[in-house]
Amino acid sequence: MSIDLNCDMGEGYGSYTMGSDEEVMPLVSSANVACGFHASDPATMHRTVRLAKQHGVAVGAHPSFPDLVGFGRRQLAASPQEIRDDVLYQVGALWAFCRAEGVRLRHVKAHGALYNAAAKDLPTALAIAEAVRDVDPTLWLVCLSRSALVEAARRTGLPHVEEAFADRAYARDGALVPRSVPGAVIHDAARVEERVLRMVREGKVQSIDGVDVPIAAGTICVHGDTPGAVGLARAIRERLQREGVEVAAFSKEGAK
Amino acid sequence: MSIDLNCDMGEGYGSYTMGSDEEVMPLVSSANVACGFHASDPATMHRTVRLAKQHGVAVGAHPSFPDLVGFGRRQLAASPQEIRDDVLYQVGALWAFCRAEGVRLRHVKAHGALYNAAAKDLPTALAIAEAVRDVDPTLWLVCLSRSALVEAARRTGLPHVEEAFADRAYARDGALVPRSVPGAVIHDAARVEERVLRMVREGKVQSIDGVDVPIAAGTICVHGDTPGAVGLARAIRERLQREGVEVAAFSKEGAK
Amino acid sequence: MSIDLNCDMGEGYGSYTMGSDEEVMPLVSSANVACGFHASDPATMHRTVRLAKQHGVAVGAHPSFPDLVGFGRRQLAASPQEIRDDVLYQVGALWAFCRAEGVRLRHVKAHGALYNAAAKDLPTALAIAEAVRDVDPTLWLVCLSRSALVEAARRTGLPHVEEAFADRAYARDGALVPRSVPGAVIHDAARVEERVLRMVREGKVQSIDGVDVPIAAGTICVHGDTPGAVGLARAIRERLQREGVEVAAFSKEGAK
Amino acid sequence: MSIDLNCDMGEGYGSYTMGSDEEVMPLVSSANVACGFHASDPATMHRTVRLAKQHGVAVGAHPSFPDLVGFGRRQLAASPQEIRDDVLYQVGALWAFCRAEGVRLRHVKAHGALYNAAAKDLPTALAIAEAVRDVDPTLWLVCLSRSALVEAARRTGLPHVEEAFADRAYARDGALVPRSVPGAVIHDAARVEERVLRMVREGKVQSIDGVDVPIAAGTICVHGDTPGAVGLARAIRERLQREGVEVAAFSKEGAK
């Protein structure tokens, strides 16, 4: 029994730092590396790929709308064609650092507002999926569970994995409870660990109103941008290992 | 007997246009495509690669210092490591559009101030060459004749080609006469054609002070950013063809 | 009897040109100068302010969402607070060039997607109006007729002027007919001239379906980004003058 | 007896933080606020001006070469005209936030590579000084002691102040010892305090090789970008106050 832990990485920019990549990298199995549109720059990308390589962590691209000042969190009315070209550009840029370090680029996970748009809007999701397929049809697409991205991956024939969130509450229909709702983010480490274990072993999570919801998560998203987040990631990692669940990249050779 | 004609392409940005790519593409055999740092954006890059494909023109990357407002013409005190990562990023970005269009990326030619710096400064030249080699050691490096870039290509084992300029005067030592010197740019089409023919057939060009200078040009740079430039490129192309000189990419399969 | 003609200006960027500022400046009475977020750069802004000064044209700021590659035409989910600060920044930047040239900054007209958002969404409109008031409460706000911007100008106490479009069809309710509708843009110069004259003299325009609509335009927007647009602006200017209508800035001293 | 303490502020960007503005602002008398070219964005600038206002700290602009990814630390071959327009733009942008908060913009201090270039190169220094004078000839220019900036301030008639560095060693000729030289940065708080006191009281500092050097510092630069730097700034502030030296902005009304 195994599960993937993924984390957004390489989100500094120039002299600015974001997150604790050195501490988090040993804890996860997949790194989503920012590509310069919401965060990161060439030097940061190179350093992040090298760090992932040192820890045997699978490298994926983390493309975004072009919005550095807004950290990619603001919806932008880009056309599907613009999104496709923006994703091609970013995936290619990261690919070069993978080549330079002799590692394979494994997956793509859209960032922030682009990820949210792609979860709801099929043309946006297809624009991303087509860009990924056009670069390399063996790349995995990381998709919000039950979202338009899943449908886009199917239509384009891309291998894909559904993502669950370790510390987020779910609604009865499997959707994430918005952060504005009390209880949407779970801070208690023991509870988070239990939820992750149950997702992995039983494919279920209890909704915010107490109903068991099926969840087909092939990867669990953890965060590394606060001291608390790093501690939580470490707690999850250690608990999984104590319980005999291997932490391994969904994209490892022959995983499809 | 054959020679390559190369031209900088895809140098628009968003709503802005630069040059006459549609008119020039049929005239050349190699296109140096801007990668977003001094010019171009993802949509423009994609369009340019597609246009090159339609005309069977070899696609190369045209990386620059990050200076959009200065069009990459201003020297920037970037470290060799920063230059290496900037080049990796840009070459990778263009590679993605080549993949999407099913064409091979063939060569890399640095732009503007970066090209000039690399011609004189070996650490800069090595930073570029190492980045290119680390992405793909079969990529060709376009080098100013007798410059530090040639030395860098040799040290990194990259295939390389020396570039001559159709409409520029040369000094006795083979260096370009600076644009500030009267006579540095040759506007007379007939004279330009003759010079190009002599470079190709005899490997020689007459210096501004009347001495024959050996020149080992594997590619001739033409411009497309003014109506006059397009006309000159067309005149050179047609003259070469009338004289039985084939216009063909230096980077074509098996060309090394 | 007088009317203002306004045009977006200074929309080049670095080596890129946009529009025909030299030709259009003598034809208009108000220039909306781009401020670096959708177009323009410091050198272009300075040049444009100097050109306006030479022709006695009133200078206004033309702030936008930060989206250079999209030319500010794409809606961005910026918060009102972000919009307020972005407008403050851009208006201040242009103000400096006015100071350096000894001209007064007179008005502010939002650009593209920001203008469209402000026309419909009161919080966006208020964000712009509050920023303008906070810099200088004597600045005029240019508003789409009957839009939320008019309401925002009233609430903040800013002097404001309603804008009509010379070459655009209007619906029965006074709204612009979307460009996607056939007939939305009027290309016939004689018809455009007649419409402008009637707006000025009678305060009316005929809707696309033939009904007279009241229109309280204090300024008419003309374009300068195509050869045809310049010709149309010239035709309007000359017709107004032949008919005895003065072309003069709405923001001239004592105009409120 | 009084002295000014100045610190670079507002050097975050979007989601990124830099320095400890909240902790440092109460300790200094002048804040040099980044203007978006090497750091900062409109929201950060507004917040920083508001914070300075709360603590009665004089606000100055801190313009830079356009190099966000390099934090303005890399020399760029911009022309004097480009530098002048870049400075106008940045000073104007900051001015708007001062207007919105009802505080006066007091001074300008160039950042990083631009400051270093202006210290040595008179055309660069004049470009900065002329831009400042053209916006407002009552603005103070902060100058490296004995540098070309001092000369530029004199020629343009700007009020100016010479700056000393609390924790940096000086050579016998009054120049800063380059950071690469051992002993160039003084970390011992007590020694730093003594040096500052002697600069203020006696106008002297001991050079790295033991000779007394005259220094006419009207402002002392402190840093706030590390925990140690904040502690050092606090130590200096408290020592000055214990010794009866007032910490007050050089630019306060009537200070010239």
Image (cartoon, coloured by chain):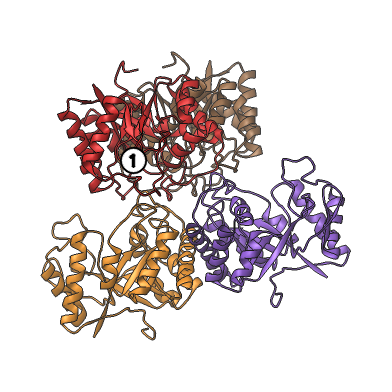
Chain colours: A brown, B red, C orange, D purple
Q: Secondary structure at mark 1?
A: loop
Q: Nearer the viewer, residue D229 or D22?
A: D229
* Vertical relation: A200 (above or below) C114: above
> Which chain hosts label 1?
B
Looking at the rendering, which quadrant does residue B2 occupy? Answer: top left
Q: Residue at x 43, y 60 (%)?
A: C43
Look at the image and tell me in which quarter the N terminus of chain B lies: top left
Residue furthest toward the front?
A: B210
Q: Nearer the viewer, residue D245 or C156?
A: D245
Q: Is residue C58 visible?
A: no
* Vertical relation: D101 (above or below) B255: below
Q: Nearer the viewer, residue B152 or B183?
A: B183
What residue sits right under mark 1 in the picture?
A: B168
Q: Residue at x 74, y 47 (%)?
A: D177
Q: Position of residue B83 (x, y in %)?
A: 51, 35
Residue D105 as seen in the image, left or right of residue D234:
left
How many numbered discs, if any?
1
* Vertical relation: A31 (above or below) C19: above
* Vertical relation: D213 (above or below) C61: above
Q: Is residue B36 visible?
A: yes
Residue furthest toward the right?
A: D243
Q: Position of residue D45 (x, y in %)?
A: 57, 59
Residue furthest toward the top?
A: A254
Q: Position of residue B45 (x, y in %)?
A: 33, 37
Looking at the rendering, which quadrant does residue D251 occupy? Answer: bottom right
Q: Residue at x 17, y 56 (%)?
A: C181
Q: Position of residue B33 (x, y in %)?
A: 34, 36
Residue B188 as seen in the image, left or right of residue A128:
left
Q: Residues within 10 Å of mark 1 (few under 14, many from 20)?
A: some
Q: Amino acid at mark 1?
A: Arg
